[in-house]
Amino acid sequence: MVERSWQRCAAAHNVDPAQGWAADILSGAEFRQVSGRSVPLMRAALPEMRRLFDLVYPMGLLVLLADPDATLLARCADEAQSAHCRRMGLQQGAMWDEAIAGTNGVGTCVRDGDPIFLGQGEHWRFCLSLLASFAAPIFDAQGQMVGALNLAAFHGDSSRPAAPLLMDTLTLAGRRIEEQLFRTRYDGRKVLLLDAADGCSAPLVAIDEDGQVVGATRAARTLMHWTDEMIREQPNLLSALEGDDSPSFRKAEESVIRTALATTQGNVTRAARTLGISRATFYRKMRMLGIA
């Protein structure tokens, strides 16, 4: 991922790595306009940012939130870091688009849609060489990227030994933000988990009282090969899962059945009604999946 970004910086962005650079900062009016488009994201993300900062600040890390254009929306940092943040452009309204800043955490993350870790010397610009950066994308209730969550440090490679742990912690925080966005969007609907989360997105679906799918996260769309048009047609969840006999679909179907039973305290009639199928069909699926 870093190599691809460096290639873009050299061939497409024409960014000189040796050239000095300072982030452009939006004016107050410009920032209000930009941040106004990200109100749902900020509302869901700020509590999670504060929780994350409590975990990482002893390591000298700060927490940043960016929109899908790599403009910084919010920051959690120790007061002692404020001056350094201003010098580095790690503040509200700073624009970190990869095309102008070169390879960097939030800019490259939103460009590729994948998590990234940049240690000492892995940012494209030499002036950022001592910056360490961890970034993970955040997706909205329609599976579209709405921003990135970032951990940053000024002490180069000192955080590299803990990089896997920090990246996993960051990814989990991003998933919780995504889930909050999803549950807020589909408030009042039943939300089911199709499988264990693997990556930045959890495979969640929202269904109506007839068991028809009304919403799905990015991971669920990928698992089920759903497009926006297919979701607009509101497929029945279990009917869609029956269409494929692969292990992943069987596992998803079992997860749906077990979740329905759990939410109805084992009442099969209510669980079947929740999923929009008959009681006999529900029992058949239980036998087929080996659910007692």
Image (cartoon, grey):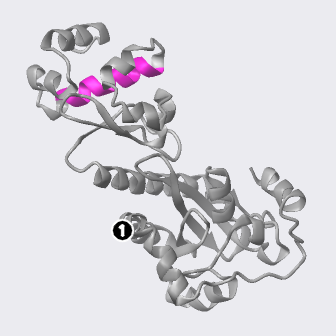
Residue 269 spot, x, y in % from top left: 9, 20
Residue occupying image coordinates x 51% and y 87%: 29
Q: Quadrant of the C terminus?
A: top left
Please count the marks in the image. 1
Between 284 and 187, the residue placed more toward the observer is: 187
Q: Nearer the viewer, residue 165 or 47?
A: 47
Residue, disc 1: 43
The correct choice, above or below, for 156 with respect to 119 in the image is below
**Residue 169 left/right relative to 121:** left
Image position, residue 147 (x, y; %) = 53, 61
Look at the numbered disc 1 and give the secondary structure of its residue.
Answer: helix
Residue 103 lies, in percent from the top left, at: 76, 63
Q: Residue at x 48, y 42 (%)?
A: 218
Other residues around mark 1 within 10 Å, as few (<14) / some (14–19) / many (≥20):
few
Amino acid bearing label 1: Arg
Query: Does the segment drawn in magenta span residue 258?
Result: yes
Q: Which residues are magenta?
A: 248-261
Whether 36 is drawn above or below 4: the answer is below
* Residue visible at 34% across and 26% down in the picture: 235
